[in-house]
């Protein structure tokens, strides 16, 4: 059965170009009414124009879809609230949120200005929080919502010169984990996409032959799946160049020691065993880690009686 969004209202931030544009076009082509949000600034977040968003809206309308343009700055909560209120007034709800907007202010950590660190977190992490917050109560009231956040391999795995961007993008994982848990009882499913694509933010970093394989449209199928009615929740998907993967944070089985052995020397002596990933598993919540450690302590105590 084909995934459709008939009767659903979607907001895609940063949708004037690149990934956001591809996501907005994809949602509209499958029946969603789409708010094409884009502040219209430069890659570093300066400037601003509604032209890019309006161009995408015209593309959608020319193909028979329904869309409106919005120039809200995602780092301004009042503007985000107004965007959600406008969509709700016009179309009755906001069912799908794709938080894609972002900027880059890359510098090595030694040279990074405080303002550049703060601004990137403000747009990526705080802006994503604002977008989720603005749609949350409406989704709870209707017992339905699908949210996709955007992380990056720069945060998950590290990348030189992107302390601000990497910190913000890794923050998405913590936000997803909590919102997915809190949204379960009202069928709000929250997932995260980790894309790698040829966009304004990557065009100077990769050779032309690699960029040719990294179309933004290669990411959109994963986003559309994560926004669908039967989507999972609390899932990180990697996507790029036609490849799709699931990313999980794993914890080694670990080793439990008696209090007499609580020392850095003990850890050093047993570090190979402690870090052995042969029995690593993904934990399903913060308290699961606590339960695991208590259970290991209980096993050790019982074995030594």
Image: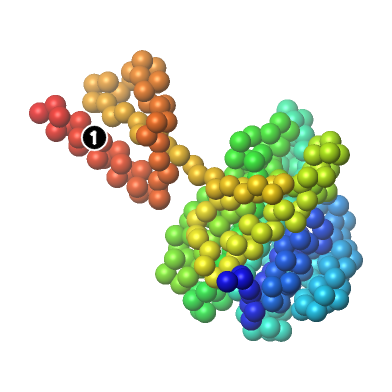
Viewer-nearest residue: 273 or 117: 273
Residue at x 28%, y 29% (from the top left corner):
256
Residue 230, above or below 151: below
The residue shown at (76%, 53%) is 216
Residue lying at the far front in this picture: please name it: 1
**Residue at 60%, 74% in the rendered image:** 95
**Badge count:** 1
Please identify the quarter of the rendering in which residue 53 is found: bottom right
**Residue 269 drawn at (x, y percent):** 36, 15
Q: Specify whether 208 is left or right of 279.
A: right
List x then y, in percent, for residue 99: 66, 60
> Based on the displayed image, in which of its 4 quarters is residue 252 positioned?
top left
Is 208 left or right of 273, judged from the image as shown? right
Q: Residue at x 61, y 70 (%)?
A: 3
Q: Is residue 183 left or right of residue 160?
A: left
Position above or below: 39 against 249: below
On the question of residue 190 being in view, the answer is yes
What percent of the width, then of the height, locates residue 165?
69, 43
* Residue 168 visible here: no
Quadrant of the rendered image containing residue 16: bottom right
Element carrying mark 1: helix
Which residue has dot 1 on it?
A: 297
Q: Is residue 280 left or right of residue 28?
A: left
């Amino acid at each position: 059965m084909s995934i459709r969004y008939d009767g659903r209202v979607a907001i895609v931030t940063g949708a004037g170009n690149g990934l956001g544009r591809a996501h907005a076009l994809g949602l509209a082509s499958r029946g969603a009414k789409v708010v094409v949000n884009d502040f219209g600034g430069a890659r570093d977040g300066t400037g601003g124009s509604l032209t890019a968003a309006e161009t995408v809206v015209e593309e959608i309308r020319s193909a028979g879809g329904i869309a409106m343009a919005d120039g809200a700055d995602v780092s301004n909560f009042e503007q985000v609230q107004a965007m959600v209120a406008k969509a709700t007034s016009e179309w009755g709800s906001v069912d799908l949120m794709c938080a894609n907007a972002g900027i880059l202010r890359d510098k090595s950590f030694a040279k990074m200005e405080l303002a550049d660190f703060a601004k990137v977190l403000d747009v990526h992490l705080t802006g994503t929080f604002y977008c989720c917050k603005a749609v949350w109560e409406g989704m709870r009231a209707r017992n339905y919502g699908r949210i996709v956040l955007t992380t990056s391999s720069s945060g998950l795995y590290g990348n030189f010169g992107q302390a601000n961007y990497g910190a913000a993008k890794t923050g998405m994982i913590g936000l997803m984990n909590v919102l997915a848990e809190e949204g379960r009882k009202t069928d709000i499913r929250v997932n995260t996409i980790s894309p790698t694509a040829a966009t304004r933010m990557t065009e100077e970093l990769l050779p032309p032959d690699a960029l040719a394989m990294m179309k933004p449209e290669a990411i959109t199928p994963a986003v559309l799946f994560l926004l669908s009615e039967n989507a999972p929740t609390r899932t990180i998907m990697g996507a790029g160049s036609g490849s799709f993967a699931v990313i999980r944070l794993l914890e080694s089985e670990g080793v439990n020691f008696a209090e007499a052995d609580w020392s850095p020397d003990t850890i050093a002596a047993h570090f190979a065993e402690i870090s052995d990933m042969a029995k690593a598993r993904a934990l399903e919540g913060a308290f699961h880690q606590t339960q695991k450690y208590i259970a290991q302590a209980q096993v050790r105590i019982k074995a030594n009686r």
